[in-house]
Amino acid sequence: MRAVVFDRRGVLAIADRPEPSPAPNEVLIKPAAVGMCGTDIHVFDGEFEGTVYPLVPGHEATGEVVEVGAGVTALRPGDHVAVNPSTTCGECEFCRNGQQNICLKWNGLGVVASDGACQELFTAPLANCYKLRPDTDLYQAALIEPLACAIRGYDLLARRLGQHYLIYGSGTMGLIMAQLAPRAGAASVTIVDLNPERLKTAAELGFANAHTSADQAERAQWDVVIDCTGSIAAIEDGLARVKPGGYFQNFGVAPADQTAAYSPFRVYRGEITVTGSMAVHNSFGRAVEMYEAGAINPGPMISHSFTLDEYARALEMFRSGAGRKLQIRPNDTESRVFVA
Ligand SMILES: [Zn+2]
Ligand SMILES: [Zn+2]
């Protein structure tokens, strides 16, 4: 069986490995699609805290159940599933307080210490597998994992009807956050991205207020500002545009060693709330519900898919900023272009 392996920091290999078999309460899955995101780049570059090499990447996966381990009755071979990559220790202070996503030993499949889905077969705990409807497009449904992260982000915002939203980043996360905003009661949604190419996707998804700078927008302040870039410049710009009483969310992953400047006086005087949002927290099942209810439009969001062999090419394309959502399709026979 073939697998993409991050052998050590910055070193990629396509390896032949024995086929895994499911342990008790595990499921063996033939992956259909695996989304690539900035986290994979951080893991490859050795910038993600705690990664243990060698590691098979891939944490945004869907697939078909091939075999179930002892004790598994909720799924059977042939079922389609989306996989929540987060596993937690269950023992630390945060797990015991119901805050599993900030577990001290948080482990994502394909991110920290357990192999992910960029291989012909992979195993996941039953508890992490969510059954999809048979008529749900299994390839596009790999967007459910980022959707689950977005729902966690919304759980941390005090949502009120009639608010104006400003979102930095017209990549997968920004576009998912933007598509959820009307469902959270937004009166308007503005999207900012420095790259005009990326704003095309926003336009295709129906967002008319999309700009390369918030200065070009129809308003100067917003009730909710969400950074989906992790860029310090975007974060500093966005914090200054939060309306008094409003919310700012650090959703994008900023480099761990960088800091941003803001006005503590404005935060004090305007009672501005600044929040973070980490991965998935009790939100994966809801992501499946919302995805299957049509909450996001996946078609314009996914531009390319790559075979396992072409993982390096996908990584290179991701770094270049070209394309939209890039996927690995570990059991596909060719790489494909959906949006040129
Ligand atoms: Zn991801
Ligand atoms: Zn824990």
Image (cartoon, rainbow, N blue to C red):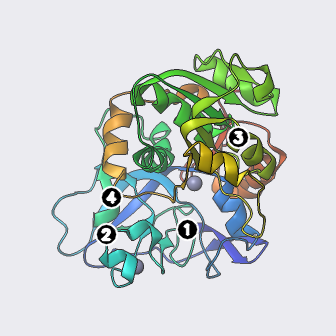
C-alpha separation, residue under disc 1 versus residue under disc 2: 24 Å
Q: Residue at x 57, y 24 (%)?
A: 189
Is residue 257 shown left or right of residue 239? Answer: right
> Do the residues bearing badges 4 and 2 touch, measured as CB atoms within 8 Å?
no
Query: In x, y percent, where is residue 245?
Result: 52, 38
Residue under numbered circle 1: 110
Q: Mark 3 points at which residue?
A: 238
Q: Closer to the camera: disc 3 or disc 2? A: 3
Residue wearing tag 4: 129
Front: mark 4 or 3? 3
Q: Quadrant of ligand 2?
A: bottom left
Number of other residues with Cα within 10 Å of mark 1, as a class: few under 14, some 14 to 19, many 20 or more: many
What's the residue type where badge 4 is placed?
Cys
- Residue 141, image x, y percentages: 44, 40
Query: Which residue does the image show at 77% across and 63% down from the upper left?
Result: 259
Name the image quarter holding residue 292.
top left
For residue 207, above or below residue 66:
above
Q: In this view, does 281 lie above or below 195?
A: below
The kind of residue on which mark 2 rests is Gly
Mark 4 vs mark 2, foreground winner is 2
Q: First in sequence: mark 1 or mark 2? A: 2
Q: Is mark 4 within 8 Å of ligand 1?
A: no
Amino acid type of the residue that numbered disc 1 sits on in the rendered structure = Gly
Q: Which residue type carries mark 3?
A: Gly
Q: In the rendered image of this protein, does residue 335 appear above or below residue 106?
A: above
Residue 213 pos. (x, y %): 80, 28
Say whether disc 4 or disc 3 marks the residue closer to the N-terminus.
4
Kind of element beneath mark 3? helix
Split into 4 quadrants, where in the image is the N terminus? bottom right
